[in-house]
Amino acid sequence: MAGYRRTVSFPAMTAAAKRSGCKIRSLSLPVRFHPVVSDMNDEVPILISWSGSFIKSPSPMWLLEGVKYISSVIDSLLRLMNHPLSVEQLRDSPTTVLISEDLLRLADSYGSFRNSLLELAPLQADMRTALRRQDPSYVDLSIREQKKAAQIIQKLASAVQRAAKARPDTTGMSTLPIALYNAMMALSSASAIVFVGISVLSDESTALAAPMAAGAEKPMTCIDVKWIMCTLNRKLRVKKKEAITDGNREEEQARAKIAAMDNLDKLDECLNTMEISCENVYKDLVNARVNLLNILSFRSL
């Protein structure tokens, strides 16, 4: 009949269906129990728990485990960003640009960290050569160079840690950007811990090798006659004691050499594996940022 619109009616929900607690999925956003979201919600707490177990003297295996957790969270981020339902949310969210900038900073940090690892490897080789030669001056020079490299890594870790604490205001922000920000904060904090851990391991190797540099001559910057006379007098006073202490010093240096060489072996293995893992993390972060840039480019059209 004219004047009537055709409608489609659905049967009312039965009492049994109400008691079963069935849920209606929304097409605007992957729901909380969507596999992609669930994976990230499971992996981020694991990464946060790992970061909370940091100790002053971390082991190489513990640091490599942390990089594995970091890679897992980034993989979940990539899957979530590539989900068709997530693209709409990210495209319309004004915070997507901020997340993209965070990804860029973190990717740059991993690029610098990987370069530091590549620079640290030959310094480790120099330290090993100096220990084998038992040359105090060479050992002392290797220690100073390795400490400089460790300080660079420490500064890099501090910069990443500051970025992790710069959390924006999430008032009025939708669920998906908040989840991404939580993941980014966890990634930044864990990355800073990995950087600090490598710096600590490097400092430990130099500390073990320090007794081998105990006789190194310090470079003179100017001629100081008074300092030379005091040094000669001191050497004359302790000359009688040297015969007694030489044996103890040699024994101490022998123990230090063995400990330092063992530590160098473990650190070399850690650096090789860490360099490969960090390269993969760097590539994944770059891919994640490219995905966000593609999403933003569609918004600008």
Image: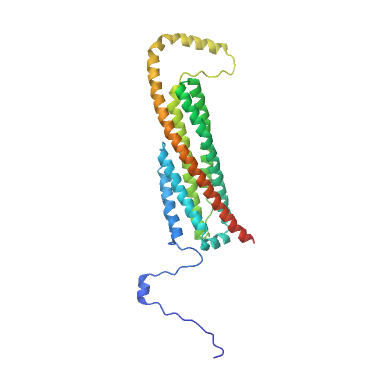
Image vertical order of residue 293 relative to residue 233, above or below: below
Location of residue 224 by image quarter:
top right
Along the viewing direction, whichever of 82 and 179 lies nearer the viewer: 82
Residue at 46 percent of width and 48 percent of height? 70
Residue at (60, 58) in percent of width and height: 296
Residue 249: image quadrant is top left
Residue 150 in sight from this viewpoint: no
| Foreground of the two, 24 or 225 | 24
| Foreground pick, 147 / 115 | 115
Q: Is residue 243 above or below residue 12?
A: above
Q: Residue at x 56, y 46 (%)?
A: 105
Q: Quadrant of the N terminus?
A: bottom right
Query: Is residue 132 something one can see in this rendering?
Result: yes
Q: How many numbered circles are shown?
A: 0
Relative to 292, 41 lies left or right: left
Q: Is residue 122 above or below residue 111?
A: above
Quarter of the image with the C terminus in it:
bottom right
Q: Position of residue 281 (x, y in %)?
A: 50, 47
- Residue at position x 57%, y 48% in the image: 104
Give the image location of residue 126, x and y in percent.
Answer: 50, 28
- For the rendered model, the colour scheme is rainbow
Instruction: Find residue 137 and report its horizontal and vertical position in percent.
Output: 50, 21
- Between 245 and 112, the residue placed more toward the observer is 112
- Looking at the image, the residue that sits furthest to the bottom is 1
Q: Residue furthest right?
A: 301
